[in-house]
Amino acid sequence: MCAELGAVAALVLALGAPADAKSCTERLKTCQGFCAKTEGRSPGCLAKCGEYRQACLASGCWESKYVSKECGFAKQ
């Protein structure tokens, strides 16, 4: 169980950080990749990514269940 949690935490850190994402749309792709790898592209997970993107487009900031609020994204 601990090994599984550690693997999930490592994946979240790897996919959750927007280091390469410079825009809301690029960050959306990262979120969708996270859904594909961890939740089999579940519709609920992908819908949440879309909600996070809409908020990012409005504010330039991305915040999700796994990612603390980060700002400075191009609104595209």
Image (tube, rainbow, N blue to C red):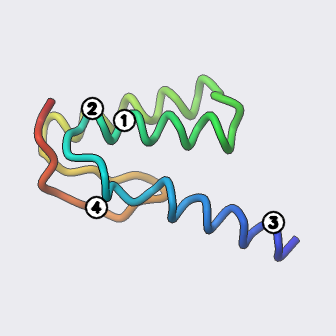
Identify the amino acid type marked 1.
Leu
Question: In the picture provided, is 14 more to the left or to the right than 50?
Answer: right
Tag shown at residue 4: 3
Identify the amino acid type marked 3.
Glu
Between disc 4 and disc 2, whose residue precedes?
Answer: 2
Label 2 sits on residue: 25
CA gap between label 4 and label 3 equals: 26 Å
Residue furthest to the top? 43
Label 2: how many residues lie within 10 Å, few (<14), some (14-19) or many (20+)? some
Number of the front mark, 4 or 2? 2
User: Measuring 38% from the left and 28% from the top, which residue is drawn there?
Assistant: 50
Q: Quarter holding the C terminus?
A: top left
Question: In the picture provided, is 36 more to the left or to the right than 25?
Answer: right
Label 1 sits on residue: 28
Nearest the eye: 35 or 55: 35
Between disc 4 and disc 3, whose residue precedes?
Answer: 3
